[in-house]
Amino acid sequence: MKKVIIIGSGPAGISAALYLQRSGKAEVCVISSGIGALAKAEKIENYYGFAQPVSGRELYENGVAGAERLGVSFISEEVVSLSYNASMQPVVSTAKNDYTADAVLLATGVSRKTLSVSGLKEHEGKGVSYCAVCDAFFFRNKDVCVIGSGEYAVHEALVLKATSRSVTILTNGQPLTADVPEGIAVIDKKITAVDGEPTVDRIIFENGETLPAKGVFVALGTAGSTDLARKVGAETENNHIKVNENMETSLPSLYAAGDCIGGTLQIYKAVSDGAAAAMTILKHLSGNSR
């Protein structure tokens, strides 16, 4: 039986999982590190089928329970990267394992994490990057840093370590939540500015100290769908993944649904996107599409 991996357990991912599992044509696995944006929804009053307000957490838990009842498997791990093997099958990499599939659906929503640091946005494309796999080549034998404090930041640092002269993780005052291998430095001071003209030249900390750096890679929190799409070379635009009307990305066997593709950021749309993606994936697995 063909294997489908869904990254994300929100409305889009669970909707797709339900349709795929009920078809009996796919082994469905959802990989997720938690509830995501729904956790912030205290009351949802405009969703069909609920006479009384429902919390985002309750809606999430009911959705996951329904998928589990049908036999969908869940893996609670943080996805850090996406790639293709020699047979052009997508491979999902977590902080612990690699998982190969016949099709992958990106449904983790859109990253809402930002960093209010002077000069960061101004230096995007001039030393500031959001994808180590994409841009490590441009910083060969240079001093670089990664802003973040979790598994995602460590993964990006390891990618850069292979080609850069030095790699430093900057936690920006946040506690480190992942093990850092030898050869990668860690600084926990608060950042006040990314400086340089016209390209990045140094990091300025709150206490006035500076760190020479030619590259700054932002890896806050966990990797969102758009981050993963960029790593594997799928087309993106304005922090969203570009898909056609069938939820197909620009790459084979890779699909996206929900907030990560843009449009109205509402639950009903995410559920609809997930169902549409599932229908397309089923056609793909049956050999009726690319």
Image: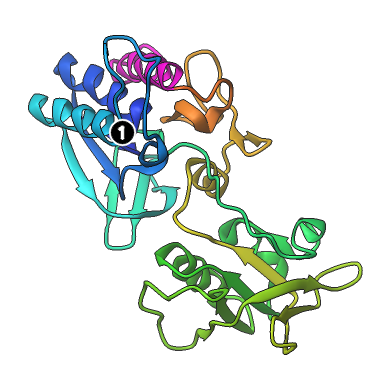
From the viewer's perspective, tell me whether residue 125 is left or right of residue 46.
Answer: right
Which residue in the structure is indicated by mark 1? 102
Q: Residues within 10 Å of mark 1 (few under 14, many from 20)?
A: many
From the viewer's perspective, tell me whether residue 91 is left or right of residue 194.
Answer: left
From the viewer's side, name the closer residue of 101 and 202.
202
Image: 61 above or below 274: below
> Can residue 103 be seen in this snapshot?
no
Residue at image location 26% in from the left, 11% down from the top: 51
From the viewer's perspective, tell me whether residue 102 is left or right of residue 66.
Answer: right
Please provide percent x and percent y for residue 235.
62, 35
Task: Assess whether residue 61 is covered by the magenta stretch.
Answer: no
> Can residue 240 be seen in this snapshot?
yes
Amino acid type at image mark 1: Asp
The single residue placed furthest to the right in the displayed view is: 197
Please provide percent x and percent y for residue 97.
27, 59
Please provide percent x and percent y for residue 57.
28, 36
Residue at image location 57% in from the left, 72% down from the top: 160
From the viewer's side, name the closer residue of 197 and 192.
192
Please provide percent x and percent y for residue 198.
91, 67
Report the number of discs: 1
Q: What are the residue bounds of the magenta stretch? A: 267-290
Q: Report which quarter residue 32 is drawn in.
A: top left
From the viewer's side, name the closer residue of 173 and 131.
173
